[in-house]
Structures are given as C-alpha cells and as structure tokens.
Image (cartoon, rainbow, N blue to C red):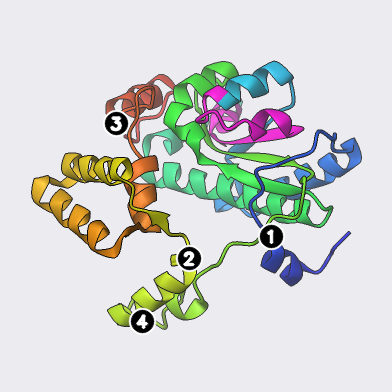
Amino acid sequence: MNDNIFDIISKRATCRSFIEKEIPEEIMDKLLDAACKSPSSGGFQTYSIIKVTEKEKKKQLVQLSRNQRFIEKAPVNLVFCIDFRRVKRIIEVEPSPCIETDTFMNFWMGIIDAAISAQTLCLAAEAYGLKTVYIGNIINTVDEVAKLLNIPQYVCPVIMVTIGYPTSIPKTSLKYDKSILVHEEEYKDIDIDVLMEAYKKKDGNQKIKAAEKLVEKIYNTAKAYHGEEYAEKCKQYILEKGIVSTYQYWFGCYYLEEEGFLSMQGYKEFMKGQGFKWL
C-alpha cells in the first residue's frame, strides 16, 4: 500500500485495460468511505454513487459509452450523480424553503461535489494498486443511463469511474506545467509562442499521418461547425504540415455530436422529467 499522497498524485494514470480480478470487499468499502468523506458545497453532500458490478448492466454501459469494452471487463463501475432527492425527501418531513433544484448555481455545485467525490476515490484507489478511468460518455446518453440504473426524480448522472487491477502499469500522460496553468492575482494571457511551445511539448508527439479520409473528416466537421472558409483553412494547414495534430484529431474526428447522443433539447426534456428547472 502506498500512502505518500504526492507520489500517488504524480504517478496516477488513466487505465483502460483491466484483469478479471475482483476487488476485495474490505478495500472497496474503504474507497467508498473515502469518497463519502470528500468536501461538498454547504456540507449537504448532494451526490450519490451507484456501484455497478452485474455483468449484464456492465454490457449495457458499454453500449451507452461508445462501446468501450474495458467497462465490461473491469470488476466495478461507479456512476456519480447529482442527488437532490434526499433533500426533497427530508423537507417533506421537515418543511424548509428549498429551491435547490430550480437554480443553475446548485446544478453547477452538484457537478463539482460529485467530481470531488470521484477524484477522492480515484486517488484512494491508487494507494491499493488499483487503477481507474473516468468515463464522461455517459452524459451523452444520460437518459438511457438513468433508465438502466432506475434513477428517480431529482437525481442526475454526472460521471462514471471504471476501476480495477491493471493488466500493466499505465504510462502517465504529460501535463502542462504550473507556469501555464497558475496565474498570480489575476488572469493573464501567456505569450502565444510560450503557449505553443508548451502545447507541442505536451501533445506534440501525438502525430497522425494526414491520410485523405482523415483530412476530409476534419474538413467536414470544421465546415459544419464554422463554415467553408474556416474548413479550408484547417485543411490547408494540415496538408502543409503533413500531419494531423492532437486537437485536430480529437475535435475534428472524435468529440462530435453523434446519432444517439442527446441534443440540447433532449437534455432540457430529461432535466424537466427529473424535476430540475435549471435549464
């Protein structure tokens, strides 16, 4: 067991390959205890954690998360949710003037509370040789995830954490240095040359050959989002460099609106159905 918190933070890495080994119940209990001791807005703990271990449910989570097969292979998946249902139930007994489900501020704070809880668990998991990966894709199909997990009104899935024992120790990804991320007293734009140098140091090794189909995909995405002139600018830049960069690939080919994903109207309807009025 590693109890050096700075060492844990430094070595923590996303893992997408797990062995089929169960997590001992006493360890899982300690991780969940840690998650439930995380700080929260007002101390209200307006979040819940749904632990998913059933094979059939994990298979369905795979389908709802862009078919990422490791979700099924890992022993445990944890769905972190905003949860105002407990508050609503308590004030039915103890009348209180609560409008928490009607304001965007509380929606925002609920996401933060759930994320803090999730990260607390992820760091605690590292101490026991376990590895994790955040699955944000569940928000693309949040309505279907809610049905699968029988999530009632005033509860909303936020993020999923897949956890298990790794097949091998994953490599930590490069991060921006604090000189890029930390600002003194007020926000100040970094010189663009300094920023680009840091960006290339962090992501510059992730180069993909500018294959015709890939370039065309990015072009079509750019055209749909920003118009033909901008799309042509993207295309010419890629052709001149002969490679597709990190941002160009992920924003142009992967993180896209897809069939089956909720639209903005879909999110509004889901939130309304869950009893929230903040959209």
Q: Are marks 2 and 4 in contact (CB under 8 Å)?
A: no
Task: Name the residue that disc number 2 marks.
Answer: 205
Q: Counting residues from the N terminus, which is met first, the one under dot 4 or under dot 1?
A: 1
Query: Looking at the rendered structure, which numbered label has been put on residue 264?
Result: 3
Task: Name the residue that disc number 4 marks.
Answer: 194
Q: Are marks 2 and 1 in contact (CB under 8 Å)?
A: no
Task: Name the residue that disc number 1 marks.
Answer: 12
Q: Horizontal and vertical percent for residue 271?
A: 39, 27
Give the CA distance from mark 3 to mark 4.
36 Å
Residue 113 as seen in the image, left or right of residue 194: right
Dot 2 crowding, Cα within 10 Å, few <14, some 14–19, many 20+: few
Q: Quadrant of the N terminus?
A: bottom right
Residue 86 in sight: yes
Residue 5 as seen in the image, left or right of residue 41: right
Give the CA distance from mark 3 to mark 1.
34 Å
Give the CA distance from mark 4 to mark 1.
27 Å
Q: Amino acid at mark 3?
A: Met
Dot 1 crowding, Cα within 10 Å, few <14, some 14–19, many 20+: many
